[in-house]
Image (cartoon, helix red, strand yellow):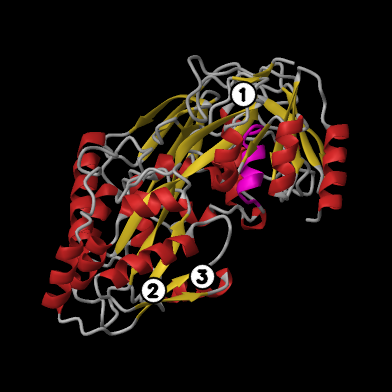
Amino acid sequence: MGSIARAALLAALLSAASAAADTITVATNADIRSTNPGVNRDDNTDAVILHIVEGLVAYREDGTVGPLLADAVEPSEDGRTYSFRLRRGIRFHNGAEMTSADVLWSWNRLMEPRTDWRCRNEFDGRGLFKVEAVAAPDPATVTMRIDRPSALFLATLARTDCGMTAVIHRDSVAADGSWVKPIGTGPFRLGDWRKGQQVVLERFADYAARPGPRDGYTGGKQALVEQVKFLVVPDPSTVKAALLSGAVDISDVPDADARDLAANPAVTLKSAPTPVMHGILLQTRDPVLANPGMRRAIAAAVDTEEIVAAVSNGLGRPNNSVVSTASAFHGAVERQGFRHDPELARRLLREAGYRGEPIRLIANKRAVVPSFAVAVIAQAMLQAVGLNVEIEVMEWATQLDRYAKGSFQMMSFSYSARFDPALSFEQISGPKDKQPRKVWEDAEALALLERAMTVTDPPERQKLFDALHRRYLETVPMIVLYNGADSVVFSKRIVGYEPWLGAKPRLWGVRRTG
């Protein structure tokens, strides 16, 4: 964007932004795609809509799942039936009181093919389990029965890309079933949506928050301002100027701008780790890399701390584990990583019989991920121990196609966030004959993962994740480098704002002083 266009947009933002203490203005880099929870959505859409709608359960601050519209969740002894006891006095934005009939209606609508819900295939038998029956035995109880025990059932219900399996009022759709607008139970309700410009949310005066402090998407969700405006500002330079001028109160910022803005007394910078996973994939079926000793040599040659410090502008925290640093399951075992040891790398290369065969490292230059920067630094480290590594830069669509086909030797790649560690391991694990994109098809690891997806007892799951991490360090199907960091800059006038592992703004519990 040119300087004249940027100045014009900033002037428009200053004109549009309210100076009232009862309004918070948030910059978003793109408009929402729809107002239909979990349908025609992206991350920006989820960030807005999850202020409006809620589900039976939601993610807590540490990535575990807790009740939201449910007062309690009671699994049966065989792990197949879940009883949700609903909270009393919950009202929709149109004033109607929520009952089990609304939950049942919302579920049935989501599971209709014409709704085109993103997550229907997670529940209809094409995923890890199948929901066989849903019932409302009384106005305050909902039961759901699945075909097999699963540790991921509640976590899937809570997924933000699923719209939190939102419970909405049936007036959200027209008589013919077409979408109108979300009538949810959240702390804010939909106000004005001017496409390409802004989305305005209004405080819901009758919202009943769960007691206690703010906790992910579950507790302490009281709205403290009358209005929230999400302004569409695609250009990062304009966002930066708008934060400093007061036209915008809160915005995510690129790492490159974060350090600069942190030094400015007009604003505050806060960062929080996310489960986004940045790393280097290794093709275990490649003739050169099939030898585990080769892959261990590559891991020993890579200095994780140096790479992370450079590519994250000092904001990232090194983590060689598939279990994110923000997870409740990231313990002492997961903190053990690959040891940087160039001499060990050279010895392992000799033992593996490496003769200088070329290895291609695929990367892309998208600004939102560290793919190319990681590749450049890693290449220098690998070449220093005698590996003949060449970087091949691709457009993102081409790289994604190569990833999906498993057509690579090495690849600098980023995985989207998964809250439950079993889902993070599932992203990388599986039989390559059926799913070529998977990087880890080790039989022992797959057996451990299957157990981790079934067992619900947290201490038992911790043991399984520990065992998976040890096996991953031994077999080296990839090198996880670090998790993403959500860097947020906000005005000194804003009180109570905290980023968290969800990497989405939460505007409840936040107020503006002037």
Q: Which residue is mark 3?
A: 400
Kind of element beneath mark 2 = loop
Which amino acid, mark 1? Trp
Q: Which mark is residue 436?
A: 2
The answer to which of 501 and 201 lies nearer the viewer is 501
The answer to which of 483 and 374 lies nearer the viewer is 374
Q: Is residue 494 above or below residue 382?
A: above
The answer to which of 426 and 101 lies nearer the viewer is 426
Q: Is residue 120 above or below residue 378?
A: above
Q: In the displayed structure, does residue 299 sit left or right of residue 35? A: left
Quarter of the image with the N terminus is bottom right
CB under 8 Å between callouts 2 and 3? no
Kind of element beneath mark 1 = loop
Which residue: 67% across, 57% down? 114
Q: Give the x, y percent position of residue 50.
A: 62, 36
Which amino acid, mark 2? Pro
Which residue: 27% across, 39% down? 78
Which residue: 65% across, 37% down? 251
Q: Give the x, y percent position of residue 397.
A: 57, 71
Q: Nearer the viewer, mark 2 or mark 3?
A: 3
- Which residues fall within the magenta stretch? 41-53
